[in-house]
Amino acid sequence: MDAQAHVDLVNEFSAHNYAPLPAVISKAEGVWVEDVEGRRFMDFLAAYSAVNFGHSNAELMQVAREQLERVTLTSRAFITDQLGPFCKELAELCNMETVLPMNTGAEAVETAIKTARRWGYQIKGVQADKAKIIVCDQNFHGRTTTVISFSTDPDCRKDFGPFTPGFEVVPYGDIEALKNAIDDNTVGFLVEPIQGEAGIIVPPDGYLQEVRQACTDSNILFIADEIQSGLGRTGKTFACDHENVKPDIYILGKALGAGIMPVSAVVSSRAIMDVFTPGSHGSTFGGNPLACTIGRKVIEILGKGEIQDHTTQLAGYLFDRLRAYKWDKVTTIRGRGLWVGIELDRVSAGKAKPYCLRLMEEGLLCKDTHEYSIRLAPPLIITKEEIDWALERLDKVLR
């Protein structure tokens, strides 16, 4: 089938919960993908940071193939030879003590919410069913019913109520608003160290340090959703590392499975995670040996630090080049590492999706977010020459 036939088939038989660009990918390697008609595109989205280490990464594919031939799933009714090493190695990468493996990012967020609530009741002493978690406006933590209950995006919420109580929304980056929202029933603050879906929004300098101090002073849990921002994307292992802060809970996903398997995890201290007892939480596929094997190789790659250094070097080059352009249609260029939000002028430029479609025609795949932002997030293995290639296309379309 040609590309249009595939698009038509998806439109006819798939639920219309996405409006994808009409690129029908059939092969991928490194930073490049190829469609069913043999056209090549540079991937500047990396599956929302899930493919941080490139498509068909040889090291990762090798360990996946080897594990596929041994065992892929037993459920958590039994222990596999990959689970313990995965949990140990991930805990050490995070400078934490305990790992609860799940599958998708949204599942990990739900798990962190359950962790904070149970910790609040059992350890902090909050009255039953009164626990409150503070979140930020423009957040994106997933699409489950509980998670959308504290979203401020109308598209996520419309006609999906009634919603789950127990959350309070404050402005992102506003430490005084956070402090004012904390009360005796507050058990945690759930925050993205950099907001991804909102358009790669970096908080004010020092904000995460102030969050850490406020959470410590008020005896609430600092819960960092690093599903998109973590595992090398910003040039550090975690975005929190840019301010040398350590949360009480890390939420990880996406790149942890390297684009091969959905792998996520909640990582914390033994004191916090021991609120779980057998039967209180679980997942048939969470911590399966195939996922753990892939995750262990991801941890090994990150442990060397080379991908983070490479990202930092190229990020400086990328931002210098981007900010040297004089695009009248662009109001702001923001981000950190190889993670960029290009904000378009709403009057002179209009919405971002038409520009993404034009970029696709030029061979560059990226995605709009929040209507007026173009987000750039290439695989972290990208080279300087490949960045130059992409920038030529961006300049042509945005000029």
Image (tube, grey):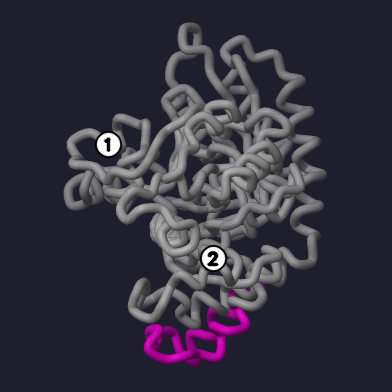
Left or right of 250? Residue 286 is: left
Residue 82: in magenta span: yes
Question: How far from the left and from the top, in percent, is residue 240?
Answer: 68, 47
User: Of 29 and 157, which appears nearest the observer?
Assistant: 157
For label 2, the crowd category at 10 Å Cα-Cα, with few meaning under 14, some 14 to 19 and many 20 or more, is many
In the rendered structure, which segment of residues is drawn in magenta? 59-86
Task: Tell me if residue 369 can be seen.
Answer: no
Examine the structure image and report whether residue 389 is included in the region drawn in magenta: no
Question: Identity of the amino acid at label 2?
Answer: Ile
| Labels 1 & 2 near each other (Cβ < 8 A) | no
Tell me where residue 150 appears, x and y as whole percent.
36, 39
Q: Position of residue 43 (x, y in %)?
A: 56, 46
Q: Which residue does the numbered mark 2 point to in the structure image?
A: 272
Q: Is residue 255 above or below residue 260?
A: above
Q: Quarter-wise, where is residue 110 in the image?
A: bottom left
Q: Considering only vertical position in the picture, is 21 above or below 279?
A: above
- Locate residue 399 relative to residue 348 in the image: left or right: right
Give the residue displayed 72% in from the left and 31% down from the top: 205
Q: Could you tell me how many numbered marks the image carries?
A: 2
Label 1 crowd (10 A; few <14 / some 14-19 / many >=20): some
Residue at the disc numbered 1: 157
The residue closer to the viewer here, 260 or 38, is 260
Sequence order check, earlier mark of 1 and 2: 1
Q: Quadrant of residue 342?
A: top right
Q: Quadrant of the C terminus?
A: top right
Residue depicted at x 62% and y 75%: 296
Q: Secondary structure at mark 1?
A: helix
- Mark 1, mark 2: which one is toward the viewer? 2
